[in-house]
Structures are given as C-alpha cells and as structure tokens.
Amino acid sequence: MKDHGTAVSEISAALILADKSDVHRDRVVNKNIATFDIHDRVNYAVTDTKFIIDEKNKIVTLDLTIDTKICPVLDYFEIFMERTRMSKIAAKFLNVWFELIINDTKLL
C-alpha cells in the first residue's frame, strides 16, 4: 500500500489499519545491519508489536517496543508519520479511536 490515501469503505479502513501497523523486526529480509536503509533500521528496531482492539471502548491501539540502541524513535516518525495519520483517519471511518504507544509512552 502507498503512504497516501484514505478509507472509502469499512474494508479499506480495516486494510489500512492492518497494513500501516505492520512494523516488526521479522519484516527485515536483509540481515546485514551495516547495509540497512532507514526502513530496515526502523523495522529491525521494533522488537515487539501489539495491535489491540478494545471493542467495548472502541479503541484500536498500536503498541510498539523500539530498541533505541538500533534507531531513535524519531526515525520511526520520519517514515511512519503519514502512515500513522492514515491509520488515525481509517479508525475514525470505523468510528473508533486510534492510539499509538511507543516504549510505554502514549503518543496518540
């Protein structure tokens, strides 16, 4: 999926949330850290990802653990800011709230 666009249906909103929340070390194919680009570095730094759906309170939460020895949290936002915005809009389309937690800090 691209890094721009918006939900036009419930299915597209759910797909955006799933796609834009897919960040984790397992996504990195290249295991040579010396040759990582920013996408590899950020994905590799994410050691734990939880996508939590709280139906009762109508909240979806992306909870990430980022190893800041590998990359700073700011690098995550450099490549994921637009994706985060898309997730927030997709959640709103579904009439739920989108939360982002990184290293136990609630950011949204």
Image (cartoon, rainbow, N blue to C red):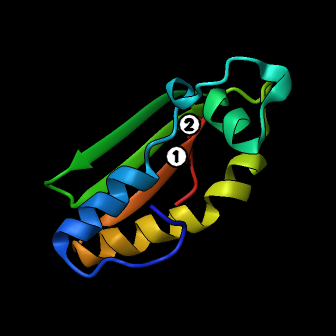
Q: Residue furthest left?
A: 56
Q: Amino acid at mark 2?
A: Asp
Tell me, yes or no, whether the two marked residues, 1 and 2, touch with CB atoms within 8 Å.
yes
Return the x and y of residue 46 as percentages of the image width and height.
59, 31
Q: Is residue 32 left or right of residue 81?
A: right
User: Is 82 above or below relative to 66?
Assistant: below
Q: Amino acid at mark 1?
A: Ile
- Secondary element under disc 1, as helix, strand or loop, is strand
Return the x and y of residue 41 as percentages of the image width and height.
73, 34
Q: How many marks?
A: 2
Depth check: give the residue in front, 44 or 59.
44
Q: Residue furthest top?
A: 31
What residue is rendered at 76% in x and 18% in y?
Answer: 32
Is disc 2 surrounded by few (<14), some (14 to 19) or many (20+) residues within 10 Å? few
Depth check: give the residue in front, 107 or 50.
50
- Secondary element under disc 2, as helix, strand or loop, is loop
Return the x and y of residue 97 as percentages of the image width and height.
33, 66
Quadrant of image for the N terminus: bottom left
What residue is rendered at 22% in x and 72% in y?
Answer: 94
Q: Is residue 21 left or right of residue 17?
A: right
Return the x and y of residue 73 as percentages of the image width and height.
73, 43
Label 1 – label 2 distance at C-alpha: 6 Å
Residue under numbered circle 2:
104
Q: Which mark is residue 101?
A: 1
